[in-house]
Amino acid sequence: MSEGLVIAVPRGALFEETLDWLDRLGIATGEVRTNDRRLLFEDVGLITMRPSDVPTYVAAGAADIGVTGKDVLMEQSEAAAAGVGRDVYELRDLGFGRCRMVVATVAGPDPAAEALRRLGVIRIATKYPRIAAAHFERTGRQVEIFEVKGSVELAPLTGLVEAIVDLTATGTTLRENNLVVREEVAICTARLIANPVAHKLRAAAIEDLLERSRAA
Amino acid sequence: MILPIPRGTRDVLPDEMRELAAINDSVRAVFAAAGYGEIHTPALEYESVIGRGALDGARPAYRVFDENGEVLVLRSDMTVPIARVVGTRYATADLPLRFAYLAHCYRAARPQRGQPREFLQAGIELIGAGGERGTAEVLTVLCGALDAAGLARYRVGLGDAALYPALLASLGVEEAARPPLLAELGRGDFVGLEAGLRALALEEPSIELLLEVSQLRGGADVLHGPPGPVADAVAGLRAVHALLDERVAARIIFDLGLSRAPGYYSGAVFEVYDPAVGIPLGGGGRYDHLLGEFGRPLPAVGFALEVERVHEALAAEERLA
């Protein structure tokens, strides 16, 4: 039972584990598992979407709570840093979906260090331009960022960039492309987020769900 | 010809304007009936003057140079300009002072997410009335204005901005370690708050108390806590609640973890919620130290409603009805 709460569920890498977590809370996910076309499961209060859309729905109140990766929240909160920035509340680290946000380059002598020394700037390809920019700014290095939407591993192999900033779970894709991890930017896990108004007005239902999550 | 206007600004055409004007007329009548005199101040102020108010989270975002090279800012709220007016024009006036306003304010926003840079605020400031009685009067006018605008389902969250800083201090968190924790509380990053507290080597019961207080919200039954800052804040909130009419008291949600962006809040703080809108419709609180920055140290309390969001909530309530 979700007690009338609308819960945003991410499709993709976090999908199965999010559904398992919901099962442990006693929310029926059978229909969501068997039906990949349907997006809206009103009878159980679940809506499914891309992980990066979860904060958008939750911030606007179209969903009361949701599950998404810390990588998505970091990318959006770097964007929010200039503003007042209280779009969604981050209630709980759910622990699953653990991956690392890393800086990687081709194996051998570090081409990023070489570029920084000789050219004064590292070229970086990433799907997370704001996290990447913030990381290099914090560590005092100049970078040029190329935002790509598809396979980031391609960029350093073709000479587009010297390094990439990307999420890796097992490191297999990096290894297969002869890439090695040079730095760790952050550890990312699944987070439970809430709309700030729902957090106040639906406090009892949300606390009850957190209580069941602790017990599960 | 399609000619653009800056992102985050908009034209208001007659159909919408009529509905906004109806809201404005209703709240203006409530302010006037409660004895609050409407005032106007310039949208442009000197940065050197307005900067005396600590405005973290609501700093003026737009600056221009005037013909003498002075830096002017577009006001980001009306509380700080009214503090200036009190210090300058009411230096010896009898207290309390009651001011109301309907005015456009300007803040940096993420316009790609539909946040406005220019928005209409309707609010009041009660100056020179300290303590629970002043807070209760302002909450009463706030609910009167929302009722008059026609909102049926709103709630007002009530907390104390001084509670969390005092609690951190009483549990031995060093002064330098407090601002990041308060920023995490303000952002609602409770995962970050817990990680920050655990990194400080506090005792486990202290960490649990701090995390529990950050989440304590609901009816009067949430109002409990050990002696010290929590009990003091609870006593203060109970005293405010006891002064409210039944009609107003029924709207209140207690929220010990509530914190609001501008840094000038010093005591009771409140926020207006409507289930149809995902962001607060407005809010306010006590700012007992701000007036001193403008030469007249006085306790004060006020609120501002975002008129366009109240309108959005009204439209949503109509759809549901």
Image: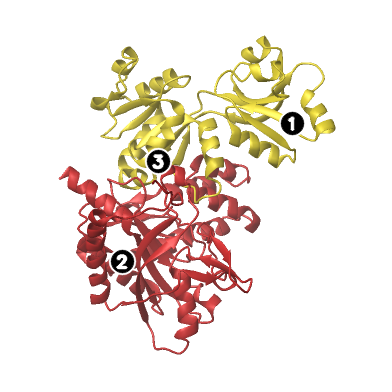
Chain colours: A yellow, B red
Task: Kindly check if marks 2 and 1 are in contact, taking CB atoms under 8 A apart as contact.
Answer: no
Amino acid, disc 3:
Ala
Q: CA distance from mark 2 to mark 1?
A: 55 Å
Chain of the residue under label 3: A
- Outermost residue on the front side: it is B1
From this view, report whether residue B128 is shown above or below residue A157: below
Amino acid, disc 1:
Ile
Residue B220 placement: quadrant: bottom left
Task: Kindly check if marks 3 and 1 are in contact, taking CB atoms under 8 A apart as contact.
Answer: no
Q: Between residue B88 and residue A205, name the one nearer to us.
A: B88
Amino acid, disc 2:
Leu
Query: In the displayed structure, does residue A41 sit left or right of residue A79?
Result: left
From this view, report whether residue B182 is shown above or below residue B128: above
Chain of the residue under label 2: B
Look at the image and tell me in which quarter the C terminus of chain A lies.
top left
> Which residue is drawn at the image coordinates 44% and 69% (left, top)?
B79
Chain of the residue under label 1: A
Q: List x then y, in percent, for residue A95.
A: 51, 27
Q: CA distance from mark 2 to mark 3?
A: 27 Å
Of helix, strand and loop, which one carries label 1?
Answer: strand
Q: List x then y, in percent, for residue A111.
A: 79, 23
Which residue is denoted by mark 1 in the rendering?
A122
Look at the image and tell me in which quarter the N terminus of chain A lies.
top left
Dot label at residue B139? 2
Q: Nearer the viewer, mark 2 or mark 1?
A: 1
Count the numbered circles shown. 3
Which residue is denoted by mark 3 in the rendering?
A59
Q: Residues within 10 Å of mark 2 (few under 14, many from 20)?
A: many
Which comes before the other along the chain, label 3 or label 1?
3
Of helix, strand and loop, which one carries label 3?
Answer: helix
Whether residue A214 is visible here, answered yes or no, is: no
